[in-house]
Image: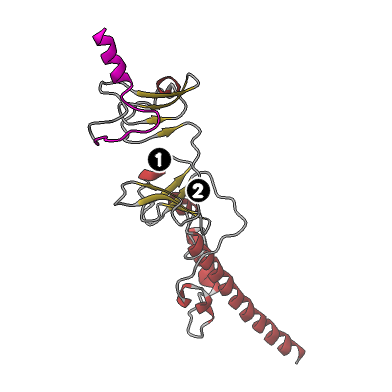
Amino acid sequence: MGILCGLTINAQSWSLTGNTGTTAGTNFIGTTDNKDLVFKTNGTEKMQISVNGDIDFTGSASSNYPYLFPYPSKYKFYGPTTFSLYENQNDFVIYSNPADATMFRVDGENMNIYLQEDYGKVIIGSKTLGNCTSCTGYNLLVKGGIKTEKIKVEIAAENGWADYVFNKDYKLMSLKDVESYINTNGHLPEVPSTEEAIKNGIELKAMNILLLKKVEELTLHLIGQNKRIEELEAKQKK
């Protein structure tokens, strides 16, 4: 009888209306053996905390996610998790470490979402781009293409644009030299070959500036040819 009373007292040691006089590290809700902690509502499992520290909101994580649970990661969330956001600049933040970099932040006041705002890369659609040896200096890596209605590229300085072609001291390659270069190399001067473009890709800003340069050079050639045609026509009339 005494044993039963002791079990009853221990089972009721936590009150359903709150507790006082608790000691952190001594008083807790959880397990003391190598078992997961399970939470239920209406007799059905709704949440589980594994011995590894993983958190599952769907229940029966070991059967639903056999390849993810347990797993060598400190914190993970599975299932239809919903976060309610309130109006301040740090509605929701995910850190790699609270004293380290911010990996994900929702700014509800200004309606902005930040990814890797301190440092790092954002990779979309690929598991291998993170090891890309030629991706240094790029923060957004997308596999499969980007579709959008507008892209604006910043130009750092005036000499970054191609209008220097119209300077009086610019040395324009003659059409004869251009023809010779094309016959030898199979592409325009300064423009990457097909092989180079496939191997290294192209820089959108650099390529647009280069194409503009070629259009401006072509324009100068057309202006020069037009002047010669007018001179010939004038001589013919005389």
Q: How far apart are marks 1 and 2 (CA)?
A: 33 Å
**Residue 128 image label:** 1
Residue 61 or 229: which is nearer the viewer?
61
Residue 124 in picture, x, y percent from top left: 47, 44
Residue under label 2, please give it: 85
Residue 144 or 237: which is nearer the viewer?
144
Q: Tell whether position 5 is magenta.
A: yes
Quarter of the image holding residue 151? bottom right
Question: In this picture, is 72 found above or below 117?
Answer: above
Residue 37 or 104: which is nearer the viewer?
37
Q: Which amino acid does label 1 sit on?
A: Thr
Q: Which amino acid does label 2 sit on?
A: Leu
The residue that appears at 48% across and 84% down in the rendered structure is: 169
Task: Locate the C terminus and report the quarter of the image it occupies.
Answer: bottom right
| Residue segment shown in magenta | 1-24
> Relative to 97, is 46 on the left or the right?
right
Q: Tell whether position 36 is magenta.
A: no
Mark 1: secondary structure = loop
